[in-house]
Amino acid sequence: MTISGFHDNPGQLTFAVPKGRILDEALPVMARAGVEPDAEFHDPKSRALSFACLRPDMRLIRVRAFDVATFVAHGAAQVGIVGSDVIEEFDYADLYAPVDLGIGLCRLSVARLVDGGDEPQGASHLRVATKYPNLTRRHFEAAGVQAECVKLNGAMELAPSLGLARQIVDLVSTGKTLKENGLVETDVIIEISARLIVNRTALKTDPRVAALVDAFRRDAEARRLEGPGQ
């Protein structure tokens, strides 16, 4: 991977965005708040991780969703956008999520094979395949069940049919992927939306961060007033 638009500028803000499902919805929201990457960001052939922005005091980094939270929590990036699932999974003390952007809507759910039968009555232990071990354990503990979490980063839907785990915990949007793999959704752990996140120290010490929070909040409120489909 290469680093494009990267300058050793300690006064430059770093804005972290996730690869994947949220990014396409986030870009127009970011643009309205004054965060616009340069042309290379939109080049599908680019393997860069860091990009210049139209405003010279900011750069954009594009990383995995879980890493967005880590970069911002540790102050390597001051601002970012990530799903509330990631925020809840890590629960970083130095991470603050002041704005619900109302995009990237989905849910974190439990699923099992349609014809997999019921769990044994009174079972106190269960193996679950998931990318979210903390949220998964908390969910099952609340029901008095100890969840042994098998960490997978993808292809979660294969786990039950291959005998790796009887159940999975994964993101669900339409449910189509579950159905195509012979799975049925049995419980919703949390409803998810994308959030603007900031580093708490940066918010207190850099007025540009507070200004970004205000800009994103105004945009989110305006879209809520317009109503769905606008």
Image: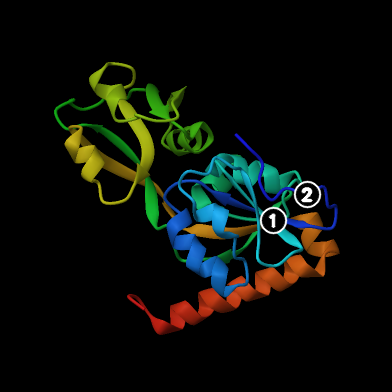
Q: Is residue 203 left or right of residue 24?
A: right
Identify the element where label 1 is drawn: strand
Q: How many numbered marks have been drawn onto this rendered protein structure?
A: 2
When the figure is inspected, residue 87 is found, relative to residue 12, above or below; the finding is: above
When the figure is inspected, residue 56 is found, relative to residue 70, above or below; the finding is: below
In what quadrant of the picture does the C terminus appear? bottom left
Identity of the residue drawn at 70% across and 67% down: 55
Q: Earlier in the sequence, mark 1 or mark 2?
A: 2
Report the mark closest to the observer, 1 or 2: 2
In what quadrant of the picture does the N terminus appear? top right
The location of residue 67, given as percent across then percent down, is: 61, 40
Q: Nearer the viewer, residue 5 or 28?
A: 5
Residue 59's tag is 1
Circles 1, 2 touching at the beta carbon (< 8 Å): yes
Q: Is residue 159 left or right of residue 202?
A: left
The location of residue 107, given as percent across then percent down, is: 38, 50
Identity of the residue drawn at 81% across and 70% down: 207
Q: Residues within 10 Å of mark 2 (few under 14, many from 20)?
A: few
Colouring mode (rainbow / by chain / secondary structure / one colour): rainbow
Identity of the residue drawn at 53% across and 34% down: 134
User: Which residue carries the number 2 mark?
Assistant: 7
**Residue 159 sits in quarter:** top left
Q: Is residue 88 left or right of residue 191?
A: right
